[in-house]
Image (cartoon, helix red, strand yellow):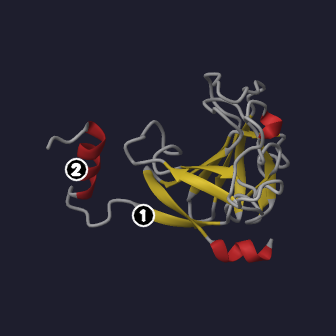
Amino acid sequence: MTLGSFQLLTLLALTAGAKEPYGAVLAHPPFATYYTCSEHSAALDFSLGDALGADCVVQAFPADEQRFWLRSFTGDGSRNEDWHGWRKAVLSPCDCEVLSIHINEITNTPGTMTPGRASSVILERADGTRFVVAHIREPMVAAGATVAAGQALALVGNNGYSRHPHIHLGAWRGDQPLQLRFDLTKMADQ
């Protein structure tokens, strides 16, 4: 059996002498409703916010079907408005300072991407942990502001390297990417 490059990189990262090569950070959930996240591997090391980050999509239970499961969109999902997360509030992952905000004015059509940096908010906790919240639109905070965990930062958008409405979250401390773990006890507070 031969290993692909992804498996080999993962194996090397896990056997490089460190029992647990990456730390983790507990974050407030990104939404006040049902959502799912897919996690990035450490091999996606384009930037500190990408490695070990997560792409999170709002989900809903369809009301018009006899079957009962979570769905990301209605219809064929070809319009941003079809996606349950489109323009939903994105919540701060932490008690943080807003370091910067970047806006990308281009809105993608689902299924297509427009290259370029996504609209994003960079946050920093008192312990130096930084978070990026990307693919947002209509920010509700300004650089220099202090925000509380669970406070609305912006709305879900679809810009930059994004194929559909969602948000990307990443965390790091110094030059070390951190694995995100969401504090699901906070979901009861919503």
Among numbered discs 2 and 1, the one appearing first in the sequence: 2
Marks 2/1: CA distance?
Answer: 17 Å
Q: Quadrant of residue 138 in the image?
A: top right
- Residue 172 — which label? none
Callout 2 secondary element = helix
Identified by mark 1, the residue type is Gly
Quadrant where the N terminus sits is top left
Image location (x, y in percent) of residue 30? 70, 58
Image location (x, y in percent) of residue 142? 82, 46
Whether label 2 touches label 1, CB < 8 Å: no
Image location (x, y in percent) of residue 58? 72, 52
Q: Is residue 2 above or below residue 65?
A: above
Which residue carries the number 2 mark?
Answer: 12
Image location (x, y in percent) of residue 13? 27, 52
Hey, which residue is sitting farthest left in the picture?
1
Q: How many marks?
A: 2
Identified by mark 2, the residue type is Leu
Q: Is residue 13 above or below residue 76?
A: below
Callout 1 secondary element = strand
Front residue of this view, candidates 38 and 83: 83
Which numbered disc, 2 or 1, marks the residue closer to the eye?
2
At label 1, counting other C-alpha atoms closer than 10 Å, the crowd grade (few under 14, some 14-19, many 20 or more) is few
The residue under the point 67% across, 61% down is 93
The residue under the point 71% across, 39% down is 165
Is 11 on the left-hand or right-hand side of 127? Answer: left
Which residue carries the number 1 mark?
Answer: 23
At label 2, counting other C-alpha atoms closer than 10 Å, the crowd grade (few under 14, some 14-19, many 20 or more) is few
Q: Quadrant of residue 190 in the image?
A: bottom right
Is 190 on the left-hand or right-hand side of 36? Answer: right
Is 40 on the left-hand or right-hand side of 156? Answer: left
